[in-house]
Image (spheres, coloured by chain):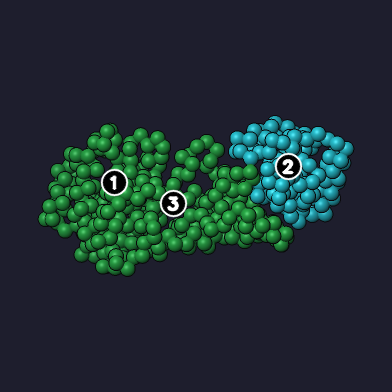
Amino acid sequence: MSNQSIKNNDENLREYLKQLLESGLETKKEPRAYEHQQVLEIIAQLQKISPDDYKNKLIIAGFTLSPYHPADDPDDEQACETCMYFQVHRKYCELPELMLPVEPEWSCRLWRI
Amino acid sequence: MANLLWLQGGACSGNTMSFLNAEEPSACDLVTDFGINILWQPSLGMELGDGVQQILKDCISGATKLDIFVFEGSVVNAPNGTGEWNRFAGRPMKDWVRELSAAADIVVALGDCATWGGIPATAPNPTDSQGLQFLKRDNGGFLGTDFKAKSGLPVINIPGCPAHPDWVTQILVAVATGRAGDLALDEFQRPKTFFQSFTQTGCTRNMHFAYKVSATEFGQRKGCLFYDLGCRGPMTHSPCNRILWNRVSSKTRAGMPCLGCTEPEFPFFDLAPGTVFKTQTVMGVPKDLPEGVNKKGYVKLTGAAKAAMPEWAEEDIFVV
């Protein structure tokens, strides 16, 4: 697949995901995966669904359209753009179980820096 | 001529195997070029039974001068402090170790088990193992805090699981040629010449570390292994990326995370499930940050690095 095709696919899919979230899709944004066991549990759920089941990926990972601010530390900001799995130039989450085009200001509960 | 005696306690022989692979200098060079006389070594010694026992007794009595005593493996104290679980040449190994250490000019602890207790001393430490002069981070170990060999030096610790062969032979050459006094040791009695810098020093993934690009699978050629795969390179003191393994590579260069095996806490987190090859985080931030970096600084740096990241940093630049 050419770079242009990848880019087009990413843009289309990103737009689709955005529409899902804007339409009020209820995602599991909490509890955050702050403990290793929680990470494993969420990853295990993601591994059970089809790679193109985008809606459930958003739900299980707890995606939101804006950064997450923990209640106990409001200055802390968890956004895709600072996450280790975020590819800056492609605007893409490369966590193997997600592999989704995202926006920098989005967030999910698997965020890690 | 410097007489060297080498014994193994609670060990897997990994450091002996490593030593036999040394190249600069080689184990043979030690004998032919640097005047080291190997009195006995588990894989090289020809003597058996009474013959070995006599060598050890002669070293202790002074009939044979013991210049360098190398100990590999942990000192096993179980059961009930007797050391009977690790007998050698007719008595508990720990009794030989105490007497030989007192007789030697220089004592070298080789590998993690001899230096800090290593894997045998991992909780619950069923063999009641200790390192020669440390138990994990605590100074003391089997010989005690105040121990000094006849030269006046404490135990020289060469950690690693195993130690790189050249660390061993180069230290032995320094000692055998009368330059032991020139060795600067760090707080854990490791020669600074090897253990002042970090495993990360010289890592080919440093640009990925700088721009916060994460590797997500073993063997991946792009990305840093610190962020997700548990690499301890930024916190571990070793020259693994300066003095390469087999002269060609290192774990991180090959896409495998550093396990921090030259540090006293190795194996980290007592090998609890999910702690190996996975970066441990607290609220999404690595539990162990690069040495000297605090959480706030780390978060700021990550934001800036990601913002400045050039496109090539996200691509595989090691093209075959």
**Colour assignment, chain B:** green
Q: Which residue is mark 1?
A: B142
Q: From the image, tell me which residue sits under label 3.
A: B263
Give A74 or B27, whichever is nearer the viewer. Answer: A74
Element type at mark 1 = loop
Label 3 Cα crowd, 10 Å radius (few <14 / some 14-19 / many 20+): many
- Dividing the image into 4 quarters, which one contains the N terminus of chain B? bottom left
**Chain at tag 1:** B
Q: Name above or below for residue B108 compared with residue A45.
A: below
Left or right: residue A90 compared with residue B88: right
Q: Would you name the residue on which mark 2 appears?
A: A108
Circle 3 sits in a helix, a strand or a loop, which is it? loop
Relative vertical location of residue A57 with respect to residue B260 in this rendering, above or below: above
Disc 2 versus disc 3: distance between alpha carbons?
35 Å
Q: Quadrant of residue A100?
A: top right
From the viewer's side, name the closer residue of B273 and B143: B143
Q: Vertical placement of B79 versus B107: above or below?
A: above
User: Is there a contact, CB below 8 Å, between mark 2 and mark 1?
Assistant: no
User: What is the x, y in percent for residue B40?
Assistant: 22, 52
Is residue B282 found left or right of A57 in the rendered image? left
Q: Residue A88, percent across and down?
A: 74, 55
Which quarter of the image is occupied by the C terminus of chain B?
A: bottom right
Which of the chains is cyan? A
Labels 1 and 3: the sequence-earlier one: 1
User: As shown in the figure, which amino acid type bears the numbered disc 3?
Assistant: Glu
Of residue B250 and residue B282, the one placed in the foreground of this image is B282
Residue B114 seen: no
- Residue A26, image x and y in percent? 81, 34
**Hey, what amino acid is under mark 2?**
Cys
